[in-house]
Image (cartoon, rainbow, N blue to C red):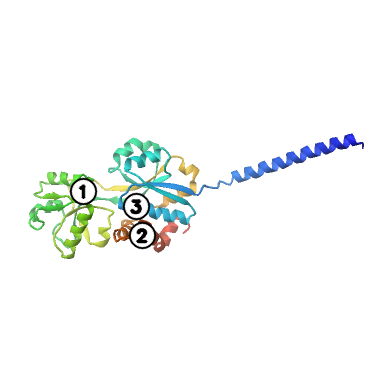
């Protein structure tokens, strides 16, 4: 074979080898692309209420156990819903529905994904210690006005539960003054009265750390001045389930009880950082964490 044909054959073999190498590389890239490896990062939006701080930090701890890099961002309720609609957050565990966040749901509900209810039976109302055995309904208050000095201890003026209480005073013709202060002021008054087993009626809601610290009861509200209970819901941005199915499965399984969340809130109220309180709860409740992770 002369040199001319040898050169042609070598050239053909070289082209074929390069072609084969290119196909192999493409096959490897395709194989890697088909593995469905999920990006292990997420951003959680939340509102700065004690219960939502607790749930968000617990979820952060849980997802970090699953290998996620987690960023949490605190915002007001309006920007929270807008952020989900605009894909600024992957999800939130902070949606109070159907009443408290009704306006935001009406505006953004068709632009977000309703994942799951994570906390049931979130109530607002008037609360007394259980040692006040004869006081069980708002309708009992006027007949016991002297015991309470005609006073209901409230929180911040303008708060939803305070507005509801103003309505309740009118609806039940209560001969009471609503004394507003702050959440801390209400809690201090409750603590002082409870220690001495004195009568007190306060504006309160669940979840709240006070229900873990004291024996308390809501007064019946037959006229529905405070309405039906809300629930807390996990919402996600649209498309999260398809893009991050493992993450979506975990947040779909996340739900807990009032006793559980109030344990975290009580540690926070005692001065523990939210992150430390969440880490403590996660460490002490491995079975619940495994349920959410799907590893039980």
For disc 1, the neighbor class at 10 Å (few under 14, some 14 to 19, many from 20) is: some
Residues 74 and 113: in front is: 74
- The residue at which mark 3 appears reads as 53
- Label 1: which residue? 156
Label 3: which secondary element? helix
Q: Is residue 243 visible?
A: yes
Q: Position of residue 26 (x, y in %)?
A: 66, 41
Q: Secondary structure at mark 2?
A: helix
- The Cα atoms of the two marked residues, 1 and 3, are separated by 19 Å
The crowding category of the residue bearing disc 3, from other C-alpha atoms within 10 Å (few below 14, some 14 to 19, many at least 20), is many
Q: Earlier in the sequence, mark 2 or mark 3?
A: 3
| Other-residue count near label 2 (Cα within 10 Å), few / some / many at <14 / 14–19 / ≥20 | many
Q: Which mark is residue 277?
A: 2
Question: Looking at the image, can residue 112 be seen?
Answer: no
Q: Name the N-terminal-most of marks 1 and 3.
A: 3
Asked if marks 1 and 3 touch (Cβ < 8 Å), the reply is no
**Which one is in front, 84 or 244?**
84
Q: CA distance from mark 2 to mark 3?
A: 10 Å
Quarter holding residue 88: top left
The image position of residue 251, as x and y in percent, is: 42, 50
Q: What SS does tag 1 mark?
A: loop
């Amino acid at each position: 074979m002369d040199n001319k044909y040898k050169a042609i054959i070598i050239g053909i073999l070289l082209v074929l080898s390069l072609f084969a190498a290119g196909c192999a590389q493409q096959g490897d890239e395709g194989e890697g692309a088909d593995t469905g490896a999920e990006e292990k990062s997420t951003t959680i939006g939340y509102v700065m209420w004690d219960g939502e701080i607790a749930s968000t930090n617990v979820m952060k701890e849980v997802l970090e156990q699953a290998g996620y890099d987690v960023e949490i961002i605190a915002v007001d309720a309006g920007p929270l819903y807008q952020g989900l609609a605009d894909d600024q957050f992957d999800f939130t565990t902070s949606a109070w529905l159907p009443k408290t966040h009704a306006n935001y749901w009406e505006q953004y509900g068709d632009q977000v994904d309703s994942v799951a209810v994570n906390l049931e039976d979130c109530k607002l109302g008037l609360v007394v210690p259980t040692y006040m055995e004869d006081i069980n309904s708002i309708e009992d208050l006027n007949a016991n006005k002297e015991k309470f000095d005609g006073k209901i201890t409230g929180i911040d003026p303008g708060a939803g539960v305070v507005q509801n209480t103003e309505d309740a005073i009118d609806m039940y013709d209560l001969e009471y003054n609503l004394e507003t202060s702050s959440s801390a002021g209400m809690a201090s008054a409750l603590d002082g009265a409870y220690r001495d087993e004195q009568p007190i009626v306060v504006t309160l809601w669940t979840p709240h750390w006070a229900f873990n610290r004291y024996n308390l009861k809501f007064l019946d509200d037959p006229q529905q001045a405070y309405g039906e209970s809300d629930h807390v819901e996990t919402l996600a941005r649209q498309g999260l389930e398809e893009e991050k199915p493992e993450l979506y499965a975990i947040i779909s399984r996340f739900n807990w009880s009032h006793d559980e969340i109030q344990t975290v809130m009580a540690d926070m109220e005692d001065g523990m950082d939210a992150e430390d309180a969440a880490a403590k709860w996660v460490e002490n409740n491995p079975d619940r964490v495994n349920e959410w992770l799907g590893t039980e």
